[in-house]
Amino acid sequence: MKKTTTKLLALALAAVMPLTLAGCSGSQGTSETKAEAQKGGEAEAPKKAKGEWPAETITLVCPFSAGGGTDIGARNMATALGKELGVNVVVENQTGSGGWIAWTDLITGDYDDGYTVGLINHNYAMGELDPDNPRQYNLDDVQLLANQAIDYNVMAIRSNDTRFTDLDSFIEYAKANPVLVSAQATGITDGDATTAEWFNKTFGTQITVVPVDGASDSRGMFLAGDTDVFFASISDVQSAYQSGEMKIACVFSEERSDFMPDVPTVKEATGEDFVAFAARGYFYPTNVSPEIAAKMTEAMLKVMEDQEYVDNMAALGLKLDNTSGEAFKELLESQVDTRKEIWGSAE
């Protein structure tokens, strides 16, 4: 009887131990910031055969702060991509240095298994041109997958601002008074800073740029009155434009945007031609196998044909663009000459 009791006790302990270990393991979470950054994009994923890619959670690294158009677009991609690939896809925000904290980590780190993918935009292509901190990496140091969207730049004014109410009155005010804007960097590597420089050189305005980690930070400073105008992308201001919280003075595109049909282009408003936009897409480090890169690219392109995804992106004011491969590289390089001309950078 004693022997039987001992056996039963051993069996009971064996059954309880895995549950106890699982409970302990579950309590060892990541930091609060990372957990918050990874909300969204998670879904129940079917089991995959060992060695088959993908078979586990994929991390999509956004180099900018949560809440801006870049981040929200990435979260939409993560959700749709998770459904397409059958695994969880989570977004992780790694901010700093205008995106270069995340980009450098992805290029130099141990991410060759295809489970970490990065978001890339025009700012990366401009890194070598930074006169204060020229970056050693360029588009040859990454595997470009697919572009996601083209997001044209705009200039927003607070609806209750009485100092200026449109682009003309802003220019006149900024010629006589110093004004502040914010951007993710202060020089050629950033599109919003480039827009500010273009205004200064074209109209003689006195615009100074304050560096921040992302569009959501710029938005917060602008709405708090810490900056005077908001240079941003359409997706950053679409909801505020629709609600009347912000007035959009102009869009920096060849034609008026379908998302803001009553907003003039900068050429309509001033007679001066200036086009500025952000191309946002995805990349792998070069040590990820071409086979995995091809599978990821194919999945992303399929996602961009999904009607629910298309509708979600349109609601954000994001114009889809499914450029991939070499054409994507050319798109990222397309504003290099424009920025060189504005900043006076040498070839």
Image (tube, grey):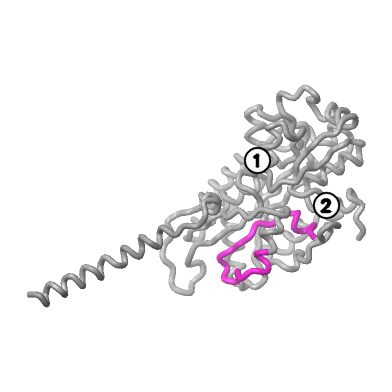
Classify 10 Å Cα crowding around label 2: few (below 14), some (14-19), many (20 and above).
many
Q: Position of residue 203 (x, y in %)?
A: 91, 36
Picture quadrant of residue 183: top right
| Of 197 and 74, the residue lying toward us | 197
Classify 10 Å Cα crowding around label 1: few (below 14), some (14-19), many (20 and above).
many
Mark 1 vs 2, N-terminal side: 2
Task: Say which residue appears at 11% left-offset and 75% top-offset.
Answer: 4
Q: Residue furthest front?
A: 2
Residue 317's disc number: 1
Q: Is residue 309 left or right of residue 174?
A: left
The span shown in magenta is 105-127
User: Are the residues at dot 1 and dot 2 in contact (C-beta closer than 8 Å)?
Assistant: no
Picture quadrant of residue 243: top right
Residue 188's disc number: 2
Instruction: Say what amino acid the circle numbered 2 marks.
Output: Ile
Residue 259's disc number: none
Picture quadrant of residue 34: bottom right
Instruction: Say what amino acid the circle numbered 1 marks.
Output: Gly
Task: Say which residue appears at 49% left-offset and 55% top-offset.
Answer: 83
Q: Position of residue 262 (x, y in %)?
A: 73, 29
Q: Is residue 222 magenta?
A: no
- Mark 1 or mark 2, whichever is nearer to me: 2
Task: Say which residue appears at 61% left-offset and 67% top-offset.
Answer: 294
Task: Say which residue appears at 80% left-offset and 25% top-offset.
Answer: 164
Whole-angstrom CA distance, mark 1 to mark 2, is 25 Å
Q: Quadrant of the N terminus?
A: bottom left
In this view, 115 is above or below 89: below
Q: Position of residue 74 (x, y in %)?
A: 60, 51
